[in-house]
Image (cartoon, helix red, strand yellow):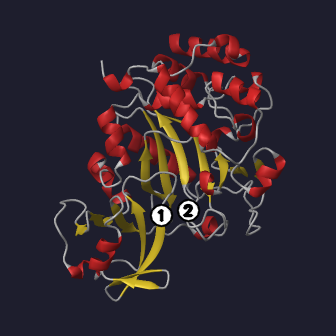
Amino acid sequence: MDRHKIRRPWKDTNFLRRKNRRIDYFASDRLTRWRLFLRGFRKDALNVLAADTFAGLGPYLSEIELKRASRILPKVLAERLIDKTALPDLLPGWAHLIPANHILFEGGQALDPATRAPLEETALEGLPEHLILKPADGVNGRGVTRVLCRDGAVEIGPKRFSLAELAAHFEAGGPVIVCTFVNQPPDIAAIFPGAVNTARVLSYIGAPGVEPVIAAAALRIGTRLSAPVDNASAGGLSARIDLASGTLSAAAGYDRPESRAAGRAVHHSRHPDTGAPIEGVALPGWASIRDSVLKIARALPAAPLIGWDLALTEADPGIMIIEANPDPNVNIHQMHAPLLQDPAFHAFLARNDALMRRRALFPGLRPYRAAARRAATD
């Protein structure tokens, strides 16, 4: 058995304690925090999720269950997916839909991301004007910066850097990659132009040889708080994408001033900064995007559960693959609807031993578990 998949309850609870220590945008009493902890949820679950009571948490995937679900992937593959330079090698047939990685800064050197060979100072010449700098193993949009490349130098704010100066600048930190900036369609940019508003699509493969399925999809929308990224953990918003039509719901955010004041995630039918409509907006080319995600997931059968970060584009098939997340944040989906109400997805997680077994603590989940058992035997 893969040691990565062996259940270690003490590691799960320690992981949840560390998560709770980082949450400071909602206050809750000690008893509430303890009751949520026993159910595997973060201390802000009743504030963030669309549930008002403990019984109402039944059909929601908890933080510990998500951690167990992430172990369905082999550990070696999960580590490669975290490395943003490895995605073209993992999806060679779809490399044309992955933004090009131009330079890797590591150990005070400027390297070719594919060969790890040192680059000459002239490597900045001929690069696109708009570029993205981001940590090669970063999460939650931390450290992502949009920069300009002009006249053989990179402009970060008011400062200009040569290739050698950039290598020295990033020497003290972890590896940083320089990749192509993706232009989004005008109607998506109109919602908030200060960030690339990306789609997060959660796909799973129920069993070996079975076709992939999309469990949920959301459009992450940047705000003045989150720019230049769109992550909800940085103050961004999340709108649910209807899987059939591609239509957006109202957008919700939790790490925001209005949510702190209300004590729960606040939904916006219009963008709070730009006033642009969100609810009811249809994503252009959604049918093509949905079909492409299923084809891409089929090309990576060893990863049965993936959260795909996709930049929307005007060129066919309408997407660029930004990341494939082995440990995706599902709260951007569950702010709108619980994931375990889908019997097929529930059965997939149950077969992989990801769900908690304290049925007495989840009275609201019983009908969903019964439906999942029927789905598993059909």
Disc 2 designates what residue? 229
Figure check: 279 above or below 159? above
The alpha-carbon separation of the residues under discs 2 and 1 comes to: 7 Å
For residue 321, what is the image quadrant? bottom left
Residue 70, given in percent of the width and then of the height, sits at: 45, 32
Q: Earlier in the sequence, mark 2 or mark 1?
A: 1
Q: Is mark 1 on a helix, strand or loop?
A: loop
Q: What x and y, as percent, mark residue 160?
A: 40, 85
Around disc 2, counting alpha carbons within 10 Å, would you say few (fewer than 14), some (14 to 19), or many (20 or more)? many
Is 151 displayed left or right of 217 in the figure?
left
Q: In this view, does 335 lie to the left or right of 118?
A: right
Query: Do tag 2 and tag 1 residues touch (Cβ < 8 Å)?
Result: yes
Q: Name the residue under label 1.
A: 144
- Residue 132, compared with residue 245, is above or below; it is below
Residue 26 position, x and y percent, is 74, 44
**Residue drawn at point x = 51 percent, y = 33 percent:** 15
Q: What residue type is labelled 2?
A: Val
The three-letter code of the residue at mark 1 reads: Val
Q: Residue at the location (33% across, 41% down)?
A: 79
The quadrant in which the N terminus is found is top left
* Residue located farthest toward the bottom when viewing the structure as drawn: 151
How many circles with numbers are drawn on the protein? 2
Asked whether residue 212 appears in the rendered view, the answer is yes
Residue 164 found in image quarter: bottom left
Taking the image as drawn, is residue 330 in sight? no
User: As rendered, which of 86 and 357 lies closer to the eye?
Assistant: 357
